[in-house]
Image: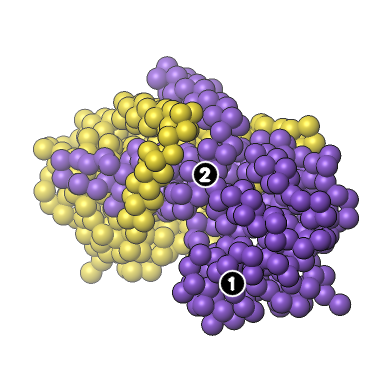
Chain colours: A yellow, B purple
Amino acid sequence: MSLFGQITIVGVGLLGGSLAQISRQRGLADKVVGYGRNRAKLEKARTLDIIDSYEDDLQAAVAQADLVVLCSPVSVMTPLVREMVSFLRPGCLVTDVGSVKKPLVGEIQALMPDGAYFVGSHPIAGGEKSGFEASRADLFQNEKCIVTPTPKTNPSALKKVRELWEQVGMEVFIMDVEEHDLIFGAVSHLPHVIAYVLMNTIGGISTKNHEDVTSFAGNGLKDITRIASSDPGMWRDICLSNKKPVLNLIDNFQGTLQQVRNLIANEDSRLLEQAFETAKKYRLNLT
Amino acid sequence: MSLFGQITIVGVGLLGGSLAQISRQRGLADKVVGYGRNRAKLEKARTLDIIDSYEDDLQAAVAQADLVVLCSPVSVMTPLVREMVSFLRPGCLVTDVGSVKKPLVGEIQALMPDGAYFVGSHPIAGGEKSGFEASRADLFQNEKCIVTPTPKTNPSALKKVRELWEQVGMEVFIMDVEEHDLIFGAVSHLPHVIAYVLMNTIGGISTKNHEDVTSFAGNGLKDITRIASSDPGMWRDICLSNKKPVLNLIDNFQGTLQQVRNLIANEDSRLLEQAFETAKKYRLNLT
């Protein structure tokens, strides 16, 4: 017997499309329905056999669902839930894939009707590409997924959401929304801001003979700025949703950069090498 | 007939080892001699057939050389040249692989005796790994090399150095030292500083349940911080040698980051997305 009768994927993009594929491949649901606003895209996802069927009417999409997974941009998740709650059937489980958890989980939980359950999730998967064309069944394999219950979370709903992510191949961590948002502010949101800012700083530099100095970029610059090709709207939303931790982290970064700047200005060779040495140790620690 | 009788590689590391390999493979010299202070490493490089032979005495290493290539750390290049100049034979050509050109080229040029010629070079190749163990014959293939003549540079020496880099597979660009140092400050030195500082900022963050938050890093953080595993001593030297452009670039970066910080603080959704959009365009422009 499958884990869910019908799974409805709200937003068939990179994550939604990948979740649809692996859920069908592993028989987690009898039926995987895609919902979105763009009928032509949904039709294409169905033709590519990513989803079983689709609906562009939200009521029709969720009315028979046992599990609704919100895979749309973070900024439209709450409005979508507000629109769908009256159509959810008793026992329906709702989760999401949003990169920021505190505001989202609070808002959505407050909207849930009696008998329907929300548990926030953040599967750490994806990349700078977006759209279902980039989706693949093994996107989640061996990656981490954070599930963020609150004191109000229904324990069996939590158990089932945990099972979902484990069944698609992920290692599940449970933490509260504040801890999640601080950690991902540090390891994901700040780095994206830095990559965008670095690209903005050097992208416009020209010299007397070279209009675009980035034509001399080596692999180092390509690596460090790869995530600057990520979806601007998505990262705007993430930065604004996780505003306080992100601002604090930017301030910490600026302080650390200012220290290194001073070491260079003062030609403090010893402490400068020490700072770089510490950074290298942290980096080699990343697995 | 080969381009050079004897090539002496001063410093058999990643770049020196790779240059030795490709020079021998392509028959650019009758003999490739390695020089270094560590006899055991030189012996290993010879055993691995990276160099034909080696010397740990500088006079013996350079006395018969038609071309000396300085592949040692930037900070010891000038002292090494000072030590070797009285042993160079007439017509000997000296070049280097340093990432900063202005101070180096001025200092070395001033040391050259009559009849020996220095031309600065910066082959854009390498990576975060160092040491001859990582060297390979195709390191330079299809990469760019900057050659930085000055008004004093001997034209046939310049021609020969250009030929060297072309023969090992590189596309050669000629520019003056100031332009070089500004461009590589932007596309290489600043990004390295940023990667180190980012790693320092987040490497030490812990939360109530997680002592090392970087264990939750995805591929994005690994990409953006990859170059933070580069050799700390080498990058200390580069930052100090190219101090003025690097400090200016750090200031520009801080200004741009402050602007983005303000957009987040003020929740200026439209301009924030625009800033990220511009960065993405610059990034997609990197080939």
Instruction: Tell me the subunit letter for badge 1.
Output: B
Q: Which residue is mark 1?
A: B55
**Residue depicted at 53% across the width and 38% down the height:** B240
Q: At which x and y percent is residue B193?
A: 48, 40
Residue type pointed to by label 2: Asp
Could you say whether the residue bearing mark 1 is in a helix, strand or loop?
A: strand
Callouts 2 and 1 in the same chain:
yes
From the viewer's side, name the closer residue of A69 and A217.
Answer: A217
Name of the residue lying farthest toward the right = B156
Q: Is residue B66 left or right of residue A45?
A: right
Residue toward you, A83 or A27: A27
Residue B276 visible in this rendered orientation of the protein: no
Q: Is residue A141 above or below residue A33?
A: below
Question: Up-down: is B257 above or below B197?
Answer: above
Tally of numbered discs: 2
Residue furthest to the front in view is B86
Q: Chain of mark 2?
A: B
> Which disc is residue B237 wearing?
2
Residue B106, quarter of the rendered image: top right
